[in-house]
Amino acid sequence: MVIRTVRRGFLGLTGVLLAYCIAAVIGAAVPGSVAKVTRDAMGDPVKIHLVAGPIHYDFLLPLTDEARDALAPLSVTGIAIDDSTQAWALIGWGAR
């Protein structure tokens, strides 16, 4: 009785893990939608830098008008997105 219950639990767990792996392979193989962006829609090119830290990388984004609008909700947390003297925003794990 106990052996049957353990066997069913093991087979159930194995089945769930196998289904998860199959779903991951199918999800990786099926292409998603791709945005069609033209040069006219993009405007001028913008340089985004990566800053290497000891254990991670941060994005260094130029604070253009579009970036300030997109990052405006961060001003509630005290980050000076609207400060015109700031030219860049450092975004990353551990960055304020």
Image (tube, grey):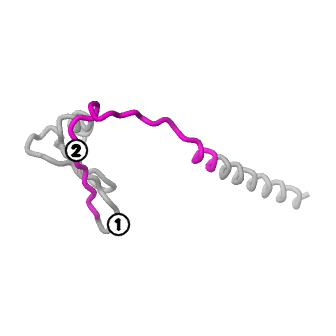
Q: Specify the quadrant of the image occupied by residue 14.
A: bottom right
Q: Earlier in the sequence, mark 1 or mark 2?
A: 2
Task: Report the side of 35 relative to 57 (left or right).
Answer: right
| Foreground of the two, 16 or 4 | 16
Q: Residue furthest left?
A: 85
Which amino acid does the dot numbered 2 rest on? Answer: Val
Q: Residue furthest top?
A: 41
- Give the image location of residue 60, x and y in percent: 24, 52
| Foreground of the two, 32 or 95 | 32
Q: Residues within 10 Å of mark 2 (few under 14, many from 20)?
A: few
On screen, residue 5 above or below 75: below
- Give the image location of residue 17, x and y in percent: 69, 54
| Mark 1 to mark 2 CA distance (whole Å) | 26 Å
- Give the image location of residue 32, x and y in percent: 52, 38
Please give the count of numbered marks on the rendered protein. 2
Seen at 33% across and 55% down, the residue is 93
Residue 27 is a magenta residue = yes
Q: Residue furthest front?
A: 39
Residue at the spot of label 2 = 46
Seen at 25% across and 54% down, the residue is 49
Seen at 28% across and 57% down, the residue is 50
Q: Quadrant of the N terminus?
A: bottom right
Observer able to see residue 66: yes
Q: Residues within 10 Å of mark 1 (few under 14, many from 20)?
A: few
Task: Report the side of 38 relative to 72 (left or right).
Answer: right
* Magenta residues (range): 24-52
Which amino acid does the dot numbered 1 rest on? Answer: Ile
Residue at the spot of label 1 = 55
- Which mark is drawn over residue 13? none
